[in-house]
Amino acid sequence: MKPHLIIAGYGPGLGEATRSHFEQNGYQVTTMARSSGEVHVDLTNPIQTKTSIDTAIAQYGVPTIVIHNVAALIRGKFLNLAPTDFESAWRTIVLSAINVSHAVMPSMQAQGKGTLILTGATASTRGSAGFGPFSSAKFALRGFAQSLAREFQSQGIHVVHPILDGIIWSDLSLKCFPKLKQESCLQPEDIAKLYWDLANQAPSAWTHELDIRPQSEPF
């Protein structure tokens, strides 16, 4: 049986590039999202999430790697936002990560190994003006990732929080930012290769967090 990768929050750009890279290296890939990927699931719903992941495990085996890429760029001036905007950002970004982690951890525990990658962003460490909902949720995801790493590392489960400091090049990004230039963006294929490296690190030299940015990105 091939090693199994689950991508939660699959979509064009990074999701496609990650799937392609891992499939080329012998992986069975299961993709999950609300409206794209093989499995259509609301990852903010714990029952739907567990059912979908249990089905994938029954079909392809316990995942060696799980990548959580779920995000919602909810932003705006604070006084123009409603509390529900913050709640929506938290549910999409954090609750989905909790549900996915809760569904996969028991099987990873049982096999004594596994890698869980929870994708972060610039907003995970810096709350910019107008990014209150997105940043507060990404900060929470970072804290959740740290807690998981400290709880499960000794059990052979590698929890990683990569911080993507920049815009990922994709058709969607170009639609949102029409003046965007490809050379100033994170390239999905390069991130996918890095995720491969993170998932295959030796236990004696695990990375929990690292920041990733294009050469042209100021920081």
Image: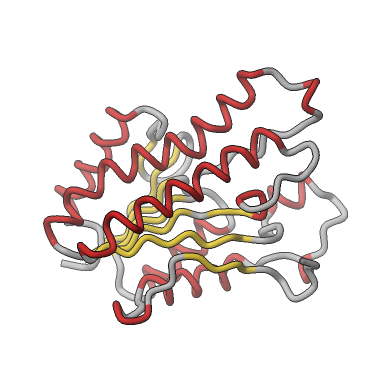
Q: Position of residue 167 (x, y in %)?
A: 71, 57
Q: Nearer the viewer, residue 46 or 182?
A: 46
Q: Residue at x 56, y 42 (%)?
A: 71
Q: Where is residue 1 in the image (x, y as percent from the top left)?
A: 15, 67
Q: Which residue is drawn at 80% across and 72% down?
A: 216
Q: Residue furthest left?
A: 110
Q: In this view, does 152 lie above or below 194?
A: above
Q: Where is residue 101 in the image (x, y as percent from the top left)?
A: 32, 45
- Residue 215 seen by the camera: yes
In the picture, measured across the screen, residue 187 lies left or right of residue 35, that is right
Q: Residue at x 55, y 54 (%)?
A: 120
Q: Which residue is drawn at 42% across and 58% down?
A: 117
Quarter of the image for residue 87 reads top right
Q: Which residue lies furthest to the right in this view?
A: 179
Q: In this view, does 83 lie above or below 38?
A: above
Q: Is residue 88 above or below residue 154?
A: above
